[in-house]
Image (cartoon, helix red, strand yellow):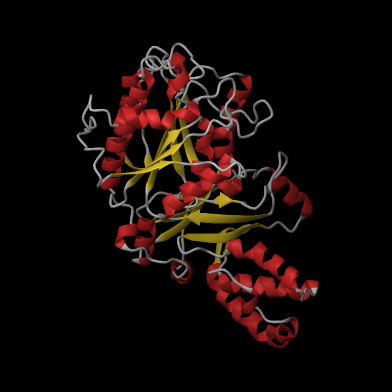
Amino acid sequence: MALSRQDLWSLEQYAEKRAEFRSKVLEHKKNRYVNLTPNARLIFEDELTLRYQIQEMLRIEKVFEADGIQDELDAYNPLIPDGDNWKCTFMLEFDDVPERRVKLAGLIGVERQVWMQVEGHDKVFAIADEDLERENDEKTSSVHFMRFQLTPNMIIDAVGGAKIIAGCDHENMHINGLELTENVRNALVNDLEKPTINQAYVMTSKVALLGIGSDHHSSFLKGAAQAPALIRESMFCPSSNSASETAVDVLSADLLTDMGDMVFSEHEQPIAQIEHEITKLAKSGSIPLALGGDHAITYPIIKALSGQFSSLTILHFDAHPDLYDEFEGDRYSHACPFARIMELGCVNRLLQFGIRTANAHQKAQIAKFGVESHDMMFLQEHEINLNIRGPVYISIDMDCLDPAYAPGVSHREPGGMSVREVLSVIQQLRHQECQIIGADVVEYNPSRDIDNMTSVVAAKFVKELLGLIAITNEKR
C-alpha cells in the first residue's frame, strides 16, 4: 500500500519520536538483509523501512511544504512491494576508492544477474533500475534498485514453507545459491499476499484475443493496421473447423474471449495505449493474444507483462532481427522492438528463427544482448531442439515465411521458412516445462495479399497458438 502524507509525522513530531522509531526500524531491518558476499548485499524494503527513509529525508532537507513532501512520497512509494513481488536495494560496498573503481568496472550488468528462487520453481532474475539507468560502458553503480516478480504458484509455495534461495550468475560474482535464514525467509513471506486458487497459473483464465491495428511505427509501407479484421474473418471462416492440430477446440467460449479491436486516441502515443490495455488484461488474469498491426506493438505488450513475469523466454519468428537501436530516427520503429525489450531486463532468453537480413549493426546487437539466433542459412543443417522452462512469449512476424506462403507482407524476403517449419518449432512446447503467457501475430499487410492467402496462414498460426496455450498452461 502506498504511503500518503497522513502516514507521516510533521518535522516537530518526528523530532520527538525519532530515537524510538529509529530503534524500531533498525531492529526490523535485521531480518531484511541478505549478504551475497562481504561486499554485496540485498536490503529488502517494505512500508516501514521506506517510511523511515522518507522521514529522514524530510528531516535532513527540512521539508515541510506539501509539494516537497509529495515529491519524496512519489520517489519512494514505487519501492514498496506490491504483494506479488520483492523489492530491494542492492549495495556494492568497497571502502577503498581505487578498489571500488576496479571492482565496479568488472561488475557491469551484475544487477540483472542477481536472482531469487522459491524451491521447486525457476530462478527469478531481478528487474533492475526501473527509474533510471545506473551503469555506463565503464562501470556499474554501487547502488541498484531491484524488483523480483513472482508468479502466483511461487507465492503459494513460499507461503506454504518452501525454501527461498538467493544467488547471482555474473561471471565475476558467481553465487550458486544461498538459502535464506528462517528469520529472513519469514520476513519476505510476510511481504506476499497469497493468491486465490483462481489466480494460480492454471488454465482457468481465458485467452483474450485483441486486435491492435497500429502501423504508426512502420517504415516503407503502411497497411498492417487493417489486418486484425481479416485475420478474424479467416479464423471463423466455415471452410475449416475450430480444432487445432493438438485437438483443442480453440474457438470455444471456455478458452477464448474476443476483446475486439483497440481504438487509438489521437492525443496519446499508441505505445502507451497498448501497454495500458495489456496491463488491464494481465491483471484480470487473461492471457493476451494480439493481432497486429506492425511489430512495434510487441514492445509495449512485453513491458506490460513484465510487471507479472520476469525471466521470460521469447520465441521470435521473423526475417529481420528487429534489434536496431533506432531506425530512421525512431527508437520505437517496428525495426527496433527487441532492442527496447532486451533493455527492460525481464527477458532471460530471446530465440530468433527465420533471420536472413542481419546487417553488421544488428549482428553486434545480437552479440550485445546474447540473442540465440537461428539464421535461415543454417536452418537445414541444424535440427532445432528447444529446451525451455518457465514463462514463454511467442511473436510471429508473417515475413518469417517465404513469400510463396505469405505474400501479404510489407517486406518480402525470399528464402524464408515454411508454415510447417514454424509449427514444428512452436509445437515442441507441448513437451516443455513452460507456460505461454502471451503471443502476437504481426506484420500481415492486406494490401499486398493475394486471394487472402496470408490471412489464412495468420489465422492458422493463431489457432495453433491457442491450442498450445491451452495445453501448456493446463499442465501447470
Count of marks overlaid on the render: 0
Q: Tell me where residue 319 appears, x and y as whole percent.
A: 48, 20
Q: Is residue 205 left or right of residue 354?
A: left
Q: Residue at x 61, y 77 (%)?
A: 25
Q: Residue at x 61, y 51 (%)?
A: 130
Q: Dividing the picture into quarters, in which one does residue 92 lie?
A: bottom right
Q: Is residue 263 above or below residue 323?
A: below
Q: Dividing the picture into quarters, in which one does residue 155 lie?
A: bottom left
Residue 265, can we see it?
yes
Between 209 and 176, the residue placed more toward the observer is: 209
Q: Is residue 178 above or below residue 410?
A: below
Q: Residue at x 24, y 47 (%)?
A: 254
Between 88 and 206, the residue placed more toward the observer is: 206
Q: Is residue 292 left or right of residue 160?
A: right
Q: Tell me where residue 76 appears, x and y as whole percent.
A: 64, 64
Q: Is residue 435 left or right of residue 18?
A: left
Residue 306, can we see it?
no
Q: Residue at x 31, y 48 (%)?
A: 206
Q: Tell me where residue 141 appears, x and y as whole percent.
A: 69, 50
Residue extending furthest toward the right: 62
